[in-house]
């Protein structure tokens, strides 16, 4: 299912494969995990600066930069380089955000924070505590393979909280399940001359080994998934983004963008279909474990 993953990662690659291809959520284009990927513009002031699959985003405001996610261990360094390649100074990052505490989205945050010492790191209470402990405390992923350099949040986010900088406003939706404090972000962005609602999906995948129903990976996990699917389905989603490129067919859309489709990332139907498929996978697993 995967190609191009450095042997260096060993068990990390194995673990990453689990993340990159969640059951029931077919990857539209096969992810390459932490492989470097050329950054590109999605919309006015919005750029993709993550790796081939560990998604990350840069928002350029008139008051400084916002960086969403840090990717895996090697992605942090790539993101800093990608920001420079796009013509911006990583030191101007004012706001650092995270989708969730898993290593493939949080291990690179420390590297970014070093490049941007003035950046304020905002995280949900549950996931922020785990990022502050470098991945330790996750109810499922245990062991050095999954741990990383800690970053302490400067601000703890509440569900529905907004962050404004230089004319941009992002809303944090705490959508637990995949992790307890998994955070989905929504914000308006201009794409091909039209203001659109962007949604950066945290993750809705049920990792192989997660326990749902009577016995849970963490208490309240099943109810969290239920609540999150209701939230996701209610949120406007025109520019469909997420923490893995494979969630929203990043590589295929990028090719379409390069071929001249300026609004390649506007994909309301794809977003809807993704949530339908993802929820069906959740329900199938819940039923399988609780017949
Ligand atoms: Zn994850």
Image: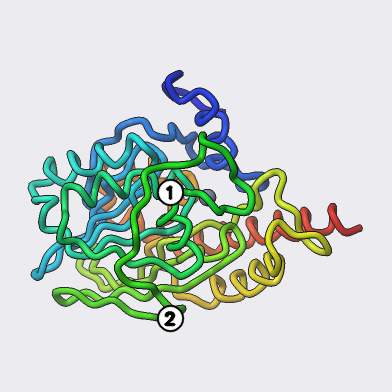
Q: Is mark 2 within 8 Å of ligand 1?
A: no
Mark 2 or mark 1, which has the lower sequence index?
Answer: 1
Q: Contact, CB < 8 Å: mark 2 with mark 1?
A: no
Q: Nearer the viewer, residue 122 or 37?
A: 122
Tell me the residue at 59%/43% (across/down): 142
The numbered dot on residue 160 is: 2
Q: Quadrant of the N terminus?
A: top right
Q: Quadrant of the C terminus?
A: bottom right
Tell me the residue at 67%/61% (across/down): 279
- Image x and y of residue 214, in percent: 83, 64
Q: Is residue 117 left or right of residue 214?
A: left
- Image x and y of residue 138, in percent: 57, 53
Q: Is residue 174 left or right of residue 105?
A: right
Relative height, residue 3 to residue 240 (above, below): above
Tell me the residue at 23%/77% (across/down): 164
Q: Nearer the viewer, residue 279 or 139?
A: 139
The numbered dot on residue 134 is: 1
Tell me the residue at 16%/55% (across/down): 117
> Crowdedness of circle 1 by 10 Å Cα count: few (<14), some, many (20+)?
many
- Image x and y of residue 8, in percent: 42, 20
């Amino acid at each position: 299912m995967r190609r191009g993953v450095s042997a260096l990662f060993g068990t990390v690659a194995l673990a990453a494969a689990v993340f990159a291809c969640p059951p029931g959520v077919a990857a539209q284009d096969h992810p390459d995990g932490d492989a470097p990927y050329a950054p590109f513009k999605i919309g006015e002031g919005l750029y993709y600066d993550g790796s081939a699959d560990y998604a990350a985003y840069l928002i350029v405001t008139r008051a400084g930069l916002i960086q969403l996610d840090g990717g895996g261990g090697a992605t942090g360094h790539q993101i800093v380089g990608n920001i420079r390649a796009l013509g911006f100074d990583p030191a101007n990052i004012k706001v650092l955000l995270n989708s969730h505490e898993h290593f493939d989205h949080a291990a690179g945050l420390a590297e970014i924070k070093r490049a941007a010492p003035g950046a304020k790191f905002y995280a949900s209470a549950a996931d922020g505590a785990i990022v502050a402990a470098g991945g330790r405390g996750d109810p499922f992923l245990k062991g050095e393979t999954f741990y990383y350099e800690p970053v302490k949040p400067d601000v703890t986010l509440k569900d529905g909280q907004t962050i404004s900088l230089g004319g941009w406003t992002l809303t944090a939706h705490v959508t637990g399940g995949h992790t307890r404090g998994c955070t989905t972000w929504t914000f308006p962005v201009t794409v091909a001359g039209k203001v659109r609602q962007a949604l950066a999906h945290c993750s809705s995948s049920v990792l192989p080994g997660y326990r749902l129903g009577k016995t849970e990976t963490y208490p309240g996990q099943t109810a969290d998934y239920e609540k999150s699917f209701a939230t996701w389905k209610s949120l406007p989603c025109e520019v469909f983004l997420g923490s893995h490129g494979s969630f929203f067919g990043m590589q295929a859309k990028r090719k379409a963008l390069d071929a001249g489709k300026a609004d390649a990332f506007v994909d309301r139907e794809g977003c809807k279909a993704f949530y339908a498929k993802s929820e069906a996978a959740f329900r199938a697993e819940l039923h399988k474990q609780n017949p």
